[in-house]
């Protein structure tokens, strides 16, 4: 377990955007321009804090940066020291009060990340007389620093405060009576310093200041920078000075927005180790091997009484739902029905009070899913929404929400949202399995330990990229594709086919491998690539015989596996290997190569992989 936790920590990081500037230019304009360059990270509110004759002024808004720009334009503030932020909500709805910067007694702060112990800290600060105006963990950190700032200079106040904090953060802090300084610190969330001539920048990503300088210092965890317009110094949180090299980056601004990746889709596929780690943060206690039920907003008693579960979703989220069925039926031993949302509402479903409906929706705004959710509540079921967007309609209208925290997904094709939805379902299945007495402490500990190792294994699975690129070169002209899998790999086959259709416009079908002989076998000829999702496991021999059926008809076999015997290697044209894990999580590792295959084929066919034709990121109409 300890090793697994170390693995996990390596991948944690949250989205949102920070920018700070000190120098002779109009700092507010530089910061607003920087925020625009960070828009690609996704956000739901924004704000800036700048110095004026009255002290530090804060302007914030819900929604787009242009709102912020318009009131800044009307005031035309000039400042040489400014910080700004784009927020992607994690604690508290997207709103003006929850937007950053936050202020407490002359200290003003912006923050990316999650302060895990913010509730006990908040209670302690309230006892000391601090008042809070938002629902955020960030405001708590601001008050904590302000509390220490009554006794210390700002950099020491930040150091002392951070000693009490558990979680991930990148912060930028300014203080009213120390107007020359911007303090930045990071832990598990990126923060970079831009080094100009007589001007310095602090940002969560390089593109924020790339139009001014390409000289960059990448801060490491536990490092603090103090910027003034005359220079900067970097220390550890112990105050000991640290030497860092200035690196010159050769990215163009638009390349950098995608973090050096050619497309958002590829970036998001590669972000999955980090996204999964973020989904896991604070969700269970590694020592007691207990899933934190509060996260599902369900009491043990209610969960014990659940006799049937419905899972409803659309598209890729529906494929996650099918995977969830395997997990929940396997670990909790209660029946799970899975529906496509657009069908559910019109099929007159038999739902009783006491049933639990899980809706899965990345955006939280899919019209069909929302309608199904409404219908289930009307019929008396409790609804748990597994959702990525804080404050979305699904999250607001559900009885309980499990946020996947995978960060904004910009590519229309869902990738990291899918794998993190599976993680939510896996955690739910472990929690419910334990409450229902279907899995022991030991089994739960083992399942959670596998989960902690997962980000590292997804990273390994991403190592198949070069191999997949070669495979894509061989098959990108194909007219059709067939994806086959059995058991929990069947939904991965469906997802592989959907991804390929969306991104490359090649006709593709996903099927349970055992069903092939009942029809799709007629499609097989020398032209047809057939992708087998074939991990070593209970159904290995069955799927091996399905491969023989394809082989004998001339189909071109591509195998995605975690263990191939000699026969399989002989039979296949191409083999892609992912690491081994338990059978439930194998589905996550198998999803990575199918995403990459669709991506590379789409690129080779010259398709717009981030914005495929006819598709929208969130389908808000029926
Ligand atoms: C996936 O790549 C799709 N673009 C699409 O199928 C999507 O998963 C579906 O529209 C559901 O969206 P949601 O998760 O936001 O509800």
Image (cartoon, rainbow, N blue to C red):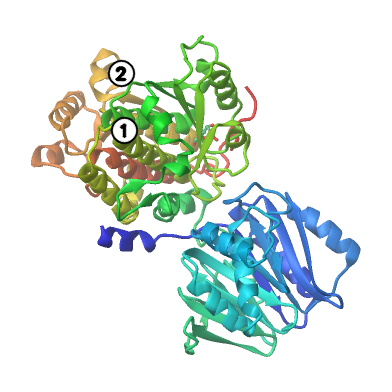
User: Residue 357: where, in percent of width, then height?
Assistant: 47, 25
Q: Is residue 42 above or below residue 397?
A: below
Q: Which residue is mark 1?
A: 327
Q: Which residue shows up at 31% across the image and 20% down it?
A: 523
| Quarter of the image where the N terminus is located | bottom left
Residue placed under numbered mark 2 in the picture:
520
Q: Residue furthest right?
A: 74
In front here: 621 or 389? 389
Question: Relative to 426, is 26 on the left or the right?
Answer: right
Which residue ends up furthest to the top in the rendered image?
Answer: 348
In the picture as drawn, the residue positioned furthest to the front comes out as 127
Q: Earlier in the sequence, mark 2 or mark 1?
A: 1
**What is the distance, in whole Å, between disc 2 and disc 1 at their CAs?**
28 Å
Within 8 Å: ligand 1 and the Cβ of disc 2? no
Discs 2/1, front: 1
**Is residue 276 shown left or right of residue 50?**
left
- Picture quadrant where residue 37 is located: bottom right
Where 520 sits versus 289, above or below? above
Mark 2: secondary structure = helix
Q: Position of residue 519 (x, y in %)?
A: 29, 14
């Amino acid at each position: 377990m300890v090793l697994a936790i170390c693995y996990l920590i390596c991948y944690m990081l949250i989205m949102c955007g920070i920018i700070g500037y000190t120098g002779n230019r109009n700092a507010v304009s530089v910061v607003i321009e920087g925020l625009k360059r960070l828009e690609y990270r996704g956000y739901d509110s924004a704000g800036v804090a700048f110095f004026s004759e009255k002290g530090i002024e804060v302007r914030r808004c819900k929604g787009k940066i242009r709102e912020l720009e318009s009131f800044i334009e009307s005031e035309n503030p000039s400042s040489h020291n400014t910080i700004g932020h784009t927020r992607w909500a994690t604690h508290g709805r997207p709103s003006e009060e929850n937007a950053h910067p936050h202020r407490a007694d002359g200290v003003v702060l912006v923050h990316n990340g999650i302060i895990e112990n913010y509730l006990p800290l908040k209670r302690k600060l309230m006892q000391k007389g601090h008042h809070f105006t938002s629902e955020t963990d960030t405001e708590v950190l601001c008050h904590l620093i302000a509390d220490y700032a009554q006794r210390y200079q700002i950099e020491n106040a930040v150091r002392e405060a951070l000693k009490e904090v558990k979680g991930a953060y990148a912060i930028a802090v300014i203080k009213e009576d120390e107007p020359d300084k911007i303090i930045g610190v990071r832990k598990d969330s990126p923060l970079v310093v831009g080094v100009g001539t007589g001007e310095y920048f602090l940002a969560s990503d390089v593109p924020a200041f790339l139009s001014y300088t390409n000289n960059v210092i990448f801060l490491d965890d536990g490092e603090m920078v103090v910027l003034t317009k005359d220079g900067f110094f970097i220390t550890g949180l112990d105050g000991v000075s640290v030497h860092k090299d200035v690196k010159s980056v050769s990215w163009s601004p638009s390349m950098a927005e995608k973090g050096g990746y050619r497309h958002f889709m590829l970036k998001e596929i590669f972000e999955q180790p980090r996204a999964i780690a973020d989904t896991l943060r604070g969700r269970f206690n590694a020592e007691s091997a207990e899933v934190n039920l509060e996260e599902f907003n369900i009491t043990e008693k209610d969960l014990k009484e659940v006799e049937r579960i419905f899972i409803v979703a659309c598209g890729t989220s529906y494929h996650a739902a099918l995977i969830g069925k395997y997990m929940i039926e396997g670990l909790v031993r209660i029946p799970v029905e899975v529906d496509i949302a657009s069908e559910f509402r019109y099929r007159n479903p038999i739902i009783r009070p006491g049933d639990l409906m899980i809706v899965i929706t990345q955006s939280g705004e899919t019209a069909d899913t929302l309608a199904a959710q409404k219908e289930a509540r009307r019929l008396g079921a409790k609804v748990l929404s597994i959702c990525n967007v804080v404050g979305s309609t699904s999250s607001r209208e559900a009885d309980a929400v499990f946020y996947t925290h995978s960060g904004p997904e910009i590519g229309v094709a869902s990738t990291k949202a899918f794998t993190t939805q599976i993680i939510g379902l896996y955690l739910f299945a472990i929690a419910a399995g334990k409450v229902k007495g279907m899995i022991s402490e030991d089994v739960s500990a083992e399942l959670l330990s596998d989960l902690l190792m997962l980000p590292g294994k997804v990273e390994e699975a991403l190592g198949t990229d070069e191999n997949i690129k070669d495979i894509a070169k061989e098959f990108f002209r194909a007219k059709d594709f067939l994806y086959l899998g059995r058991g929990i790999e069947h939904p991965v086959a469906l997802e592989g086919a959907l991804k390929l259709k969306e991104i490359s416009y090649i006709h593709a079908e996903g099927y349970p491998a055992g069903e092939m002989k009942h029809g799709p076998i007629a499609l097989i000829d020398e032209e047809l690539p057939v992708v087998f999702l074939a991990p070593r496991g209970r159904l290995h021999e069955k799927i091996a015989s399905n491969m023989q059926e394809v082989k004998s008809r001339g189909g071109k076999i591509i195998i995605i596996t975690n263990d191939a015997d000699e026969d399989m290697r002989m039979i296949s044209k191409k083999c892609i290997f992912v690491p081994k894990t338990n059978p439930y999580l194998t589905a996550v590792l198998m999803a990575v190569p199918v995403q990459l295959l669709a991506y590379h084929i789409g690129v080779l066919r010259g398709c717009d992989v981030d914005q495929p034709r006819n598709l929208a990121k969130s389908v808000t109409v029926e």
